[in-house]
Amino acid sequence: MHVAVGFMPAFKYRQKNSLKVLERGHKAHGYVLTLHMSIPQADEHETWIRQFFHLALFTAVFHLLQFTASLLLWMSTNSAALMSFGLDALVSAIAAVCLAARIEREWRNRFVAFGYLAASAGAVYLGGAMLWRGDRAAGSVLGIVLAAVSMLVIPIVGSYMKTLAVELRSQALKSAAIFTFGNSYLSMVLLIALLLNIGMALRWGDPLGALVMFPFMAQKGIQILLEEGKHEYVED
């Protein structure tokens, strides 16, 4: 009896120590598991950040090409619609660069907003002056190609921007996606204006296109100023 009583506490002690060792082992394994699980999440976030940066640069380059093409075509056709489209593309290119560079939100918003307002004023001037003088823009097949390509590319860019905005919880990227989708509207207006000028020989088709672009361009600038300070998402 004395032997049995002497061995039981020793057995319980060893069992208790073994459980502690196992518990520490499980905790250690759990820590390693948590660590390994957090690494892929961090890597995935970094991947989204890189994709956001590359997409912003691509958008800036594409808008800059739109502006350059519009400017060159305007010089040869005197098309108010093409130049108005180019002004909007220039501001959009600057906005994309500011987004990629992650410039302070307040300064970025105000600069881009005033840029859109200035571009809208330019559209009113170009369209109004052309109607007042009774000028007619020369036909431009390349302008039609520019409008058609923009209508194809812009919605794709906007869709991917929206996906990145959700993944990164970025209000700035969400707003950029909405405006990018809206730019396809300007492409459609440009296409219709150029077709009216070439296909139907309507003198007022081109300047009317510039005037139709004005409210949308102005609305973008006003909306940015009104939404300043609002945060639906957390911008990383």
Image (cartoon, helix red, strand yellow):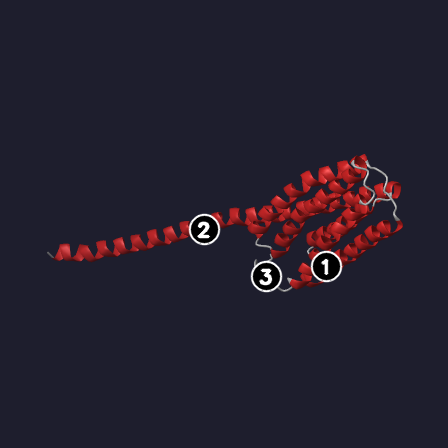
Q: Is residue 53 visible?
A: no
The label number, if any, that marks residue 113 in the structure image: 1
**Left or right position of 235 against 136:** left
Q: Position of residue 101 (x, y in %)?
A: 71, 54
Q: Position of residue 173 (x, y in %)?
A: 63, 52
- Residue ID for mark 3: 231
Looking at the picture, tell me which residue is in the foreground, 17 or 147.
Answer: 147
- Residue ID for mark 2: 34
CA–CA distance between discs 2 and 1?
Answer: 44 Å
Q: Who comes first in sequence, dot 3 or dot 2?
A: 2
Q: Secondary structure at mark 1?
A: helix
Q: Who comes first in sequence, dot 3 or dot 1?
A: 1
* Callout 2 crowding tier (Cα within 10 Å): few <14, some 14–19, many ≥20: few
Q: Who comes first in sequence, dot 2 or dot 1?
A: 2
CA–CA distance between discs 3 and 2?
Answer: 31 Å
Q: How many marks?
A: 3
CA–CA distance between discs 3 and 1?
Answer: 17 Å
